[in-house]
Every structure is written in C-alpha cells, then in structure tokens.
Image: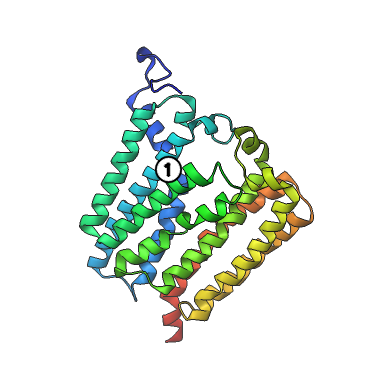
Amino acid sequence: MSDTLATPSTALPSWLARWRQFSALTKPRVVQLIVFCAVIGMLLAVPGWPSLAAWGVALAATVGIWLVASAAAAFNCLVEQTIDSKMKRTAWRPTAKGELDNRHTLGFAVLLCGAGMAVLGFWVNVLTMWLTFATFVGYAVVYTVLLKPATPQNIVIGGASGAMPPVLGWAAMRGEVGPEALMLCLIIFLWTPPHFWALALYRCEDYARAGLPMLPVTHGNDFTRLQILLYTFVLFAATLLPFVYGMSGWIYLVAAVLLGAGFCAYAFKLWRGYSEALARRTFRFSIWHLSLLFAALLTDHYLDPLLRG
C-alpha cells in the first residue's frame, strides 16, 4: 500500500472524523479489557482500601498502560493493513481502507508508546515501565510480525503478552512481581486460546483468505473444537488457584466454579456439534467469563475480610 493518503486533499475528513480514525487504531474495546485486568491487579496488590497516594499511583499506571496498549494496537493495524483489508471483520479499519498512511500511523503509535513509557517511568516505577514495554514488544513484534503469520500456535505462544496486564498492575503498586500476579497471568494465558479459537471457528474463511495459519484453517474445525474443550478444562482448574493459595475466599470460589462450569458447558456443546451461532455465543461468553471472574476477585478482596469479621 502506498504511503500516501488514498483520498485527495480536497476530500480530507474533518478533524472529528480524523480523530475517530486514530481512535479506531487503538482498538478501544480490546484495550478496555486490558486496562480493566491491569486495574484489578493494582487493587488486589493493595491490602485493604488504597490510600490517596496509592490512588494517585494507580491512576498514573492506568493512563500509562492504556497509552502503551493503544500504541501496540495501532502498530498492529499498521503491520496487518494488507491482511485486514482481506477480512470482513477488519476491512473497516482506517489503515486497511487507506484512510491513514503509514507515516501517520507509525508516528501515532510511537507518540502513544513514548507518552505511556514516560508516565510509567516518572510517576509509577521503572519495573512497570520496562514490563509494559516488553509486553508491547511481545504483542506488536513477536506475535504480530513473527508468530501470527507463521504458526497455528500463534495464539498460544503470543498469549503470554496478552496475559501480562494484571502483572503490570501488581508491579505498579508493589514494585515487584509476586506469585499472586503470576496466577492471574496464568488464568488469562489459558483463557486466550479458547477465546480466540471460538472466534476463529466462525471467521475461518476470513483467516484462510488472508493467508493466516489459524488453527481451524490448518487443522480443521473438529480438532479446534476439541482443543477449545481441553483448554476450558485446564482453565477451570487454574481459576481455582487463587482460592487454593489463600489469595481469595469463598465469594470468588463460587463465582469461579459457576463461570468455569458455564464456559465448559459451552465448549462441550461446541465440541459435540458445531454451529456458527454457538461459536459466536461461546466467544461472547468467554469475554463475560474473564470480566466477571476478575470482578469477583475484586469483590472478594474487599468483602471477604468483612464477612469473616
């Protein structure tokens, strides 16, 4: 694709339309979940209710992580613009449509990443800054450039960077990475494959047309459904670790069991008989599963000590 805008100068969109184009590059809905998990990690790292100073650090960490995550999303749009243009799910992106050129997109990503790194380095701590930058490299370079076009295990291996938000949040408040943060990281790491493979099942033609070796493309529908089922079982076990370790109490355990059973039920139905509608419902439920699971962790963090008296 040319590095020049596809539209003539006389037809340039208004400043509001241009702002919306840059905003779309940041994949707001994806970044929201990333930031949400990071914030949960921050709050769980603080015993009791955070002090005013702790809230200040949490705010700075949230802004910094949001900026760097948005930069990674924009860089992903830059690298995958040709692939995105071939897929119905992503053909609307400004880079895929040629509405933003490479120079503007790269500059935007660098600006966001630099600003986020500065916020984390000056107002949070150096550990969080470098961990966040490593996460950026893991997603934007290792996953997007190296793994995604090369192996059907791209989601599994690349999921390590996507699992880092609670670790970043924990490091922001504690200045270290504890076992509790690693357990949260493991949960997201195991959640990522069944989440994305459910999407890949009903977007298989899109991925095949784009030339991406996603699991349904390389190994077929049946094999992918089996992998989703097996991963949900392992994920279910991993979600019990915070309770077993003593990080959480009964409120979280009940939520983890109910949500895990629900996810396994969806995966089992999908394994027994495929339909696009069921794959879509499984994908949507997976988002609710992770969101509610982490919300339950936070609820338990504050309510369980009160219930124990």
Left/right placement of residue 3 relative to residue 231 reads left
* Number of marks in picture: 1
Q: Position of residue 259 (x, y in %)?
A: 60, 65
Left/right placement of residue 47 relative to residue 288 reads left
Q: Which residue is mark 1?
A: 73
Nearest to the observer: residue 298 or residue 276: 276
Q: Position of residue 217 (x, y in %)?
A: 68, 42
Q: At x 73% / y 53%, what residue is drawn?
A: 223
Nearest to the observer: residue 252 or residue 3: 3
Q: Helix, strand or loop at disc 1?
A: helix
Q: At x 45% / y 55%, what residue is drawn?
A: 161
Inspect the image, locate mark 1, and give the three-letter code of the amino acid beneath it. Ala
Q: At x 27% / y 45%, what residue is drawn?
A: 114
Determine whether 162 is above or below 26 in the image. Answer: below
Q: Quadrant of the rendered structure where residue 306 is?
A: bottom left
Q: Position of residue 20 (x, y in %)?
A: 39, 33
Determine whether 45 is above or below 306 in the image. Answer: above
Determine whether 88 is above or below 274 in the image. Answer: above
Label 1, residues with CA under 10 Å away: few <14, some 14-19, many ≥20 = many
